[in-house]
Image (tube, rainbow, N blue to C red):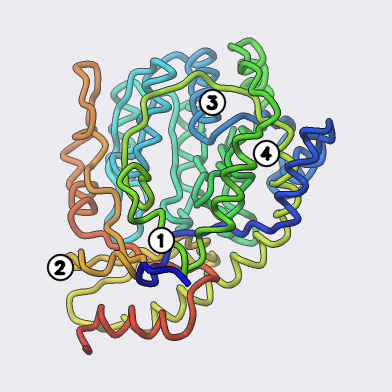
Amino acid sequence: MSLLPRAIPPAYSPVSVQSIGQGLLALAGVSRIERVRELILATYGGTTVWLVDSGTAALRLALEAAVGTRPGRVALPAYGCYDLLSAAHGAGVDIVFYDVEVATLAPDMASLREALDSGARTIVLAYLFGVPIEIDGCVSLARERGAWLIEDAAQGQGGRLRGRPLGSFGDASVLSFARGKGRTGGGGGCLIGRSPEFVTGLARGSEPTAGGRGARNVARALAQWTFARPSLYGIPRALPFVTVGETVYREPREPRRMGAATANILAANWDASEMEAVTRRAHAEWFARRLAGAPGFELVRLPPGSQGGYLRFPVLADRAEPDLARLGVLPGYPRALPDLRPRESDRVAGAVAGARALAHRLQTLPTHGLLGERDLETIGRRLRGDG
């Protein structure tokens, strides 16, 4: 038994002993890289898949290809994962930030149009915490303006819109297989190409360097399998050099190819990840019922005909809950992206008031399958102030 108090990870992706064993087989030359490509194409569609070492690397390659074929600025959401900014900095592109609606986490369409008016030829959409976006208006606007549409579905696993998975609509899509992204290989990411022009531009771009067999991700998967359970999660959470649950900006790194061990773990966990998404939705629905009408809380609206992936359950709160971190309740990203690493070349489409409001108000609740009924009740009761 752990001497530290029980603690709940804010997010979790299923990892099994069998998948770790599959990762170890890579060290003997067994590779399921092609199987992973088949699974991705069967799930998300597209014509070509590039498997790399992270979702950030995949987005960087996508941005390089986009600007290489249609020069201009890249329109990024003003609120989202800091890795969006890291990928853009690594690709060396000029950025214009567009605002995000507080109530839906979707693009503010007036701000997005302003971003395109300022010279953007690439739009990046990001599904925050697996919340779907009503994408038709974004697709139409991109076509009207001759802009690329890239879906950053790094957080989209399990989310669906009109029966299709998030990450199956754009000219290109980015996925992440990091430990908290719903589907994991201990790490890794991919870029899916659909537009022939985009795929040709990507083929002319820089090649990711060799990344080895991925032995480091076997160790990461083993650590996740060991310490993600609430009885032991207090151990990594107590170590000052382990940044679990923290939001940090990571300096850009050169993209590398996905290793065989990463692919093997990912393929072995594929089906379990689909089942985990069902559990996350059920827990999100429980929180939605529990917090509906609670003073000081507002729920994020989903578009009709959609299902959330809910890597975490986002709520808008009038007060912060810093004492609930042990229960996996954490703030969203604490800074709007234009305020994080500002550069003289950056532009902002409007005041991006929505993004800055989200930086102050957004709270996220855990939804994964490691939560028990008592955990759900405790979180719901503490948030409502019922004791």
Give the residue at mark 3.
62
Give the residue at mark 2.
319
**Residue 66 placement, left or right of 52:** left
> Please, what is the three-letter code of the amino acid marked with disc 3?
Ala
State which quadrant residue 259 falls in.
top right
Q: Is residue 259 above or below residue 42?
A: above
Q: At which x and y percent is residue 272?
A: 69, 62
Q: Which residue is painted at 38% across and 28% down in the image?
A: 86
Badge 1 marks a residue whose secondary structure is loop
Badge 4 marks a residue whose secondary structure is helix
Q: At which x and y percent is residue 198?
A: 61, 22
**Residue 7 placement, left or right of 52:** left
Front residue of 43 and 11: 11
Disc with the residue nearer the chain's start (2 vs 1): 1
Give the residue at mark 4.
262
Badge 2 marks a residue whose secondary structure is loop
Q: CA distance from mark 2 to mark 3?
A: 38 Å
User: Is any atom of residue 161 visible in this view?
Assistant: no
Answer few, some or many: residues within 10 Å of disc 2's Cα (few below 14, many 20 plus, some between 14 and 19): few
State which quadrant residue 218 falls in.
top right
Q: CA distance from mark 1 to mark 4?
A: 23 Å
Q: Is residue 216 above or below residue 308?
A: above
> Please, what is the three-letter code of the amino acid marked with disc 1?
Pro
Q: CA distance from mark 3 to mark 4?
A: 21 Å
Instruction: Give the number of the mark in front: 2 or 1.
Output: 1
Give the residue at mark 1.
10
Disc with the residue nearer the chain's start (3 vs 4): 3
